[in-house]
Structure formats: structure tokens, C-alpha cells
Amino acid sequence: MGFQHLHLFLLLSFSFSSAKAAVFTFKNNCRNTIWPGTQPGSGKPVLNNGGFMLKPGESYSINAPLGWSGRFWGRRGCSFDASGKGTCLTGDCGGVMQCAGAGGAPPATLVEFTLDSPMDFYDVSLVDGYNLPVSIIPVGGVSGSGSGTCQQTRCLKDLNRSCPPGLQVKNNSRNRVVACKSACMAFNTPEYCCTGAFGSPSTCKPTNYSQAFKASCPTAYSYAYDDATSTFTCKGANYRITFC
Ligand SMILES: *[C@@H]1O[C@H](CO)[C@@H](O)[C@H](O)[C@H]1NC(C)=O
Ligand SMILES: *[C@@H]1O[C@H](CO)[C@@H](O)[C@H](O)[C@H]1NC(C)=O
Ligand SMILES: *[C@@H]1O[C@H](CO)[C@@H](O)[C@H](O)[C@H]1NC(C)=O
């Protein structure tokens, strides 16, 4: 090819590779169907229109553009009609299958990403409570300097089972625990929510409730300022996000 064509070719291949910053591959290891939700950070695009269905054993991949940030969560116990309207037992995003930018109702276990900043930052968070076990596994990344270890992080314990009575969410018709609130959601006090006088890392300390989450899931965020043991970094990786 001529020089100009080569130039165009290089330009195109560069923009293609930079347009695809990371591939997120979701896998459902749960016994039931789940409906993952996606919500972008401010100014970032909505991935996959905000939601999709995953049957037990299924996988599904989504490309995220360079510099994407946002969160994922799983919805369970959903039923949607043909037009995509309905409800979910947990993690519902306003009664629609495709969340289109809306977040999930807590309690929901969150998977959070900030890509290319300049490393990828990621975490599993119980700050908005728990509804499903989930893990993040970086694939093919390189460890950066400092804290860039490309470590796996997860909350795979069944927190329904160990959920303290004051935090339990039950399936009305069956009286079973289906999710576990954060103490902030359950009691809405500055101490539990890290607001007001408790609104800084030095004043907001772990509480007996967040410590119970931390004991079950040591690498997940258990309260708002749990950064030191809960946020991970990697570079140039793709990510496997597995529910259950
Ligand atoms: C909640 O209860 C309903 C009605 O009994 C049942 O159909 C559904 O499977 C239950 N969901 C979960 C997640 O237990
Ligand atoms: C949580 O609650 C749901 C609904 O009752 C149940 O099906 C599930 O087994 C529980 N545990 C986990 C880890 O999801
Ligand atoms: C946490 O501490 C509060 C206040 O001291 C107490 O009422 C509550 O029962 C404790 N909860 C757990 C799960 O230990």
C-alpha cells in the first residue's frame, strides 16, 4: 500500500485499539437467572443500554471505551414483559430491563471501575449493601508501580445468611432473607453514613456492622472510607466479573 494509505491504516488501527480500552466478561455462576445492570460515571457512555439477562452458566462480554468509569451490579428475581418493563426482587433500576443510565436500588453488591486513570482502579463494594456474591478477576494486565497488583477481589460469602436482623431484607411472600442492607441504609445516621461530623476518613471509622461485612469479605469495601484494603489497580487488563 502507498504511504498515504499506510498512514490512514495506522491512524484507523490506532483509533480502533484506543476505542476499546477494556473488555468486561460477565459470567453467571448462580443457580438462577440474573440481570446485570450497568451505570456509567458522570459524562461516560451507558454500556449495553444499561442491562441484560444472563442465564445460569452463560457469559457475555461488553467493550468499554478508553477512560470509562462506572459500576455494575446484579439483579435477581426479575420478571419483565415483552416491552422490557417489570420488577426485580433486588437491584431494580426503576422497573425496566435496560437501565439506560439509572442505578440499582440498594441493597446491591457493586462492582466499580475507573479505567485508564492512568491505571485501572476497581473494587467490589458493600457500601450500598449486598444482594449477590461477585468477583473481579483481571486478565492479561500488567502490574503497575506501587499498588498496581492486578489482584482479584471478591465477596463470595453468602451475606444473606450472616446478615444481622436489623439489616435483613426479606422476600415478603416467603420470609426469606434476599439481601442485606448497609448500616447507613438501615439506620441513616452520620456515624454509619460517614456524613456530617463523620464525613472524613479520620472521623468515620469502621463500625460493628461494617466490621461484620469485612470479616466475611476482607477485600470488599465495607464502609465509605475503606480504601486501604478495598481498592485495586491494574493496567491494560480485561476483566472477568463473575456472579456467585
Ligand atoms: C420470592 O418469593 C416468590 C413467591 O413465593 C418466589 O416466586 C420467588 O422465587 C422468591 N424469590 C427468591 C429470590 O427467593
Ligand atoms: C440470598 O438470598 C436468595 C433469595 O432468598 C437465595 O436464593 C440465595 O441463595 C441467598 N444467597 C446468595 C449467596 O445469594
Ligand atoms: C452494633 O452496635 C449497636 C450499638 O451498640 C447495637 O445496637 C447492635 O446490636 C450491634 N450490632 C451488631 C451486628 O453487632
Image (cartoon, grey):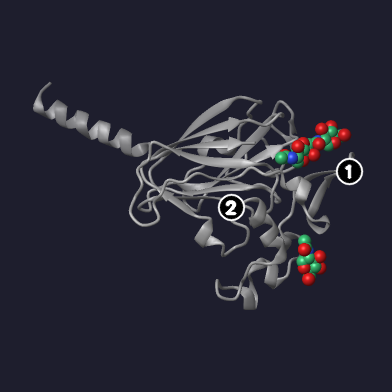
Q: Which residue appears at 64% of the width and 67% of the height?
A: 206
Identified by mark 2, the residue type is Ala
Looking at the picture, tell me which residue is in the foreground, 41 or 159.
Answer: 159
Residue 208 at x, y percent in the picture = 71, 65
Question: Which residue is situated farthest in the bottom direction here?
Answer: 197
Residue 191's quadrant in the figure?
Answer: bottom right
Residue 234 percent coordinates (x, y): 40, 47
Residue at (63% x, 58% y) in the render? 222
Kind of residue indicated by mark 1: Asn
Which residue does the numbered mark 1 point to in the structure image?
175
Q: Position of residue 180 (x, y in %)?
A: 75, 51
Total marks in image? 2
Q: Which residue is mark 2?
A: 220
**Which is more N-terminal, label 2 or label 1?**
1
Q: Residue furthest left?
A: 3
* Whole-percent x, y for residue 117 in the image: 38, 53
Residue 72: image tag: none
Q: Is residue 36 above or below residue 1?
A: below
Q: Are marks 1 and 2 in contact (CB under 8 Å)?
A: no
Instruction: Please identify the quarter of the rendering in which residue 139 is found.
Output: top left
- Ligand 3 occupies quarter: bottom right
- CA gap, disc 1 to disc 2? 27 Å
Decide: few, some or many residues near mark 1? Use Cα within 10 Å; few <14, some 14-19, many ≥20: few
Local SS, label 2: loop
Please tell me whether mark 1 sits on a helix, a strand or a loop: loop
Tell me: 169 left or right of 244.
right
